[in-house]
Amino acid sequence: MIEDSSGTPGKKTLKAEDLLSFKAVGRPIALNAVADEFRLMQAQLKTRLTSKIAARVCEKSGSHLLKLVSARAVGDEACLYIDSPSANRRPKVLPSTNAPDIPYCKLLYRPLEIMGHSTRCIVDDVMNPDEVSKTILEAFALVFGQDVLDAMRAALLERPKTITKLAAGEFPVIFVPRPDNTDLQITPVSPASAFMGMKGVINALYERRRAESVKVPHGAFLNQSISSKPQNISGAIGGPRRRIMAFMPPVLEQFDAELRRYVLGGSFPRWRDTAVADWVLRYADMLEADARYNDRNTRTALDRTADRLIRDANDFIAETHEEAILVAEEIGADPASLAVLPKPDLVLIRRRWPEDTFPKARKALTSPHFDNRSSRLATDEKVPFA
């Protein structure tokens, strides 16, 4: 343990975890006191950081860590460095080294909280320098040596070693065709930043749950210890792996899906009562009977059947419209923007018909008699159909 001489208010006895860490330790540092902080960090190392160690740590750093997919990934071929062609910054990288090198990783990757500037580690200053990086890197070279800084730059900025081996049977493989009729093998590997980003999001949810004693929303989270030596993947990841169980929203029933689609500008939902088709075909038969006999009994039965179909269709249209208004209010849509309500004949005809019966049903629902009964009921009951 050593005394704090970094210029922060109130001296205290510092431990290794106060100075070497993959997380911000809560020690704001003035820009002109960065060299002093590096000296405190150096004092916590059992052996000095050399150019050879710095190169080894940086060579085993990458944007994609194959050990996240398979623990059997070969150590020398476990890190991928992938630049995004559309990005104007180099990617965020994580180290994946053997356990003895983790203290050096905690030095090179420790987030430095520079007062008045963004938090960054030395690796960030090498890969994505900003207006104060030159000052910080000069302070680093002053303490650890220019040769160490040069070794880091060479390892991080030059092309990394090409990955040529994968643990057989443990990596997803996709083949895509090339223009020359050969195949290109693709192995999807998620970036380490996605893993760390998800971990950061879930950590915040856990902290909120502890603080507010409320259930974490939108998923089920499980802490799972995957190894007693998590540094085999990356010391920066460490600890248990958190897994998320995502629950898909329940599948909407067909009518509910059609109702929501109607609210968003789609067609009016179908009336799926299977008995309606039978009644429409019965009405078609009665039309033919009335054309042959044309007496008061057939006409009364015909009018009563048509009126029943029209009223039932009107009821379906009105009830569906009321439900659509509720859905519109629920999802923030304007109920006034709902499409004009359909006529009863359209609601009756839009269904699956038994084989070869559709022409018969269409003829009945477009007949002068049905149109006359629809117009009469619409006038009597003031139904606002198009």
Image: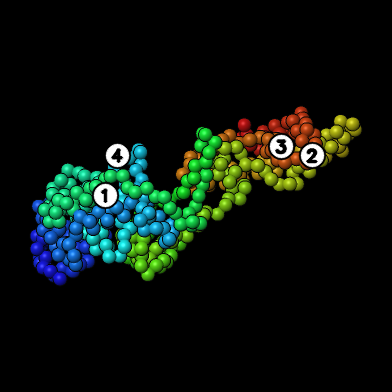
Q: CA distance from mark 3 to mark 1?
A: 72 Å
Q: Nearer the viewer, mark 1 or mark 2?
A: 1
Residue situated in front as seen by the camera: 38 or 198? 38
Badge 4 crowding class, 10 Å Cα cut-off, few under 14, some 14 to 19, many 20 or more, is few
The residue that label 2 is drawn on is 355
Q: Position of residue 71 (x, y in %)?
A: 42, 61
Among the two numbered marks 2 and 4 on one chain, the one whose residue lies closer to the N terminus: 4
The residue that label 4 is drawn on is 88
Among the two numbered marks 3 and 1 on one chain, the one whose residue lies closer to the N terminus: 1
- Looking at the image, residue 370 sits to the left or right of residue 263; the answer is right
Among the two numbered marks 3 and 4 on one chain, the one whose residue lies closer to the N terminus: 4
Q: CA distance from mark 3 to mark 4?
A: 59 Å
Residue found 27% across the figure and 56% down from its top: 57
The residue that label 1 is drawn on is 155
Residue 26 makes an appearance in the image: no
Amino acid type, mark 2 = Glu
Q: Secondary structure at mark 4?
A: loop
Residue situated in front as seen by the camera: 238 or 146? 146
Among the two numbered marks 1 and 2 on one chain, the one whose residue lies closer to the N terminus: 1
Residue 99 makes an appearance in the image: yes
